[in-house]
Amino acid sequence: MPLVCNKCGHHNTWDTASVPQGTIWPDDSDTAAGLRAALANVEAELARFQTYAVDYISALLKAKKDVEFRLQGVVYPILSLPTEIIARIFVECLPEKSRRRFSRKHAPLLLMRVCRRWRDIAVSTSELWTFLHIRCLNVSPSSDKTMVRHGALSTPSLCRAQSRLLSLIVYLDRKFWEGREVHDDISGAEALDISAILPRLERLDIGLSAEKTQLLTSWNTPFPQLRCLSLSSSDSVLSDILRNAPILKELHWTRRTDGNLNFGRFTSNTLTLLEITGRGNDVPATQLIDILENFPSLTDLICLLDLEGFDPPDHDPLTFPNLRTLKTISYGYPSYDPEINVEISVLEPLTLPGLTCLHCTTSPDAHLVTDFMSRSACAIRDLRCEFIERDPEDVWHALALFPFVETLDIDLQVHISPLLQCIDTEDKSGLQSPRLLPRLQHLTLTYSGCAVEEDPINYIRIIDVLRRRREHTTTAELRSLHIMVNETTEWERYPGDTLAAEFHRFIANGLDFTIGVQGNVVWPGA
């Protein structure tokens, strides 16, 4: 096979049995000088051939790679996409930020196991590596340190993330064996200190006790990029963070300080979502207005309320136009009295024209809600409340105040028939209940009443309501219906075969329907 060098034009053949001596040295040059010259010629020829061979093999390898790439593009069309498109798809494959953790079953580690090209793209896509998940070791309760494996913060992710902002989750995975807590081996471990990456943190989620949280770093330090924070801490730690986080938008705080909470220490002009939990350290209802005043940009407020001693202030209601979501939880402290309905009373000093989501754990008092809705003129689309009234008209009058509701979550302590009756579209003469909630699409019913001889869930009536709302032209179709039963006795009142077939037909047509007991879905597909 003739071979021609593209650089010098020299050609040779692979099948040459011997080197043509006339070309390399003359036949009459059998002298020392002639042989040295001939040897130099042979070495030069050998060097030219080796150079050519290397170039030729390189060209063949390149051709092989090009052909393999074209073959992959035919067999696996996705590999023919530009690298930038594949990288963008990889980013979209990431789980939600609140659910991310490094696992071989999920992106980005899963993507690196498909093929070499995907691995190279994944490694070079910095956006895939901005999430750090650090498991703290479970050490003796007497230890005041948070221990991690050596190099926990020196992972390849930090390098692959390049200069991007980071999200960090710190958590403690406790282990138990035969009812006994098992502690990790901490030999070679080190105390966790997150000070070095604080300037790069965009999200921080700390799942540790308030005492462990306080020791992670010096909290009175700048958090220039922090936008989302979740932690359990004392009041002093949160006060330091708010003072040093100029662009914080979202705060999920579990309060771990005993005594009164003075919101005069907490202010932020950028915070839009605030969630306060920590039963036993509830927010005094008297400070609800302080919260709204100290966080003027707040759009979503979720908090546990301490209702003890609450008395609506005697002044004109204050307007907070930015608030869209108000979710309050109370446990009837010191005692629950449905006649007083203190939790709904927190709306009395407020005017919220932008409110679209209202969650509370008591019944919506018709008088208080009427005054609130008339001055706020807001459209509540997401409502959660409870009904303990046994008079159906009380249920109807309360729900009539929320004509724009699309999502309804109700805790019932009575039979659900009054509720089904008010969302039914049946045209029947003498029907006493009004047709309510024409925009309702998502309904969750939690039955917390005592066990009764009569089945509180009338499946036949539910099927009739579902069918009639689907056929009614001016009423929204129910797209989800979840029934949760909080019974201490074993629940066995499931749909029979005929009714189950009807529900399965609705499910096949897009209805999200489940029945649950004590928080667990048991039908269908239990």
Image (spheres, rainbow, N blue to C red):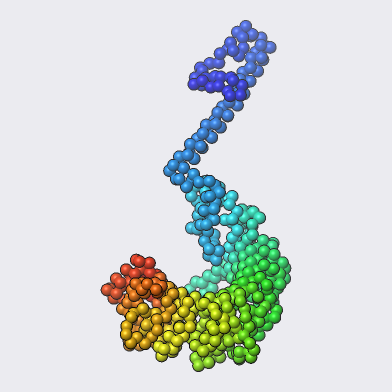
Q: Nearer the viewer, residue 349 or 182?
A: 349
Q: How many marks?
A: 0
What's the residue at 64%, 54% (across, down)?
162
Residue 401 x/y as whole percent: 48, 83
Splitting the image into 4 quarters, where does residue 460 fall?
bottom left
Res. 144 visible in picture: no
Residue 170 x/y as whole percent: 60, 66
Splitting the image into 4 quarters, where does residue 327 fall?
bottom right
What's the residue at 59%, 76% (across, down)?
323
Instruction: Residue lying at the far top in this picture: please name it.
Output: 28
Q: Does 320 appear above or below 95?
A: below
Instruction: Residue lying at the far right in this picture: please name it.
Output: 221
Decide if residue 385 is on the left or right side of residue 27.
left
Q: Does 218 appear above or below 419?
A: above
What's the residue at 57%, 83% (across, down)?
375
Splitting the image into 4 quarters, where does residue 24 fall?
top right
Quadrant, the C terminus: bottom left
Residue 244 x/y as whole percent: 71, 69
Res. 369 visible in picture: yes
What's the residue at 63%, 60% (across, down)?
166
Q: Does 280 appear above or below 356?
A: below
Instruction: Residue lying at the far left in this picture: please name it.
Output: 498
Residue 395 x/y as whole percent: 43, 86
Decide if residue 469 is on the left or right side of residue 268.
left
Q: Nearer the viewer, residue 125 or 133?
A: 125
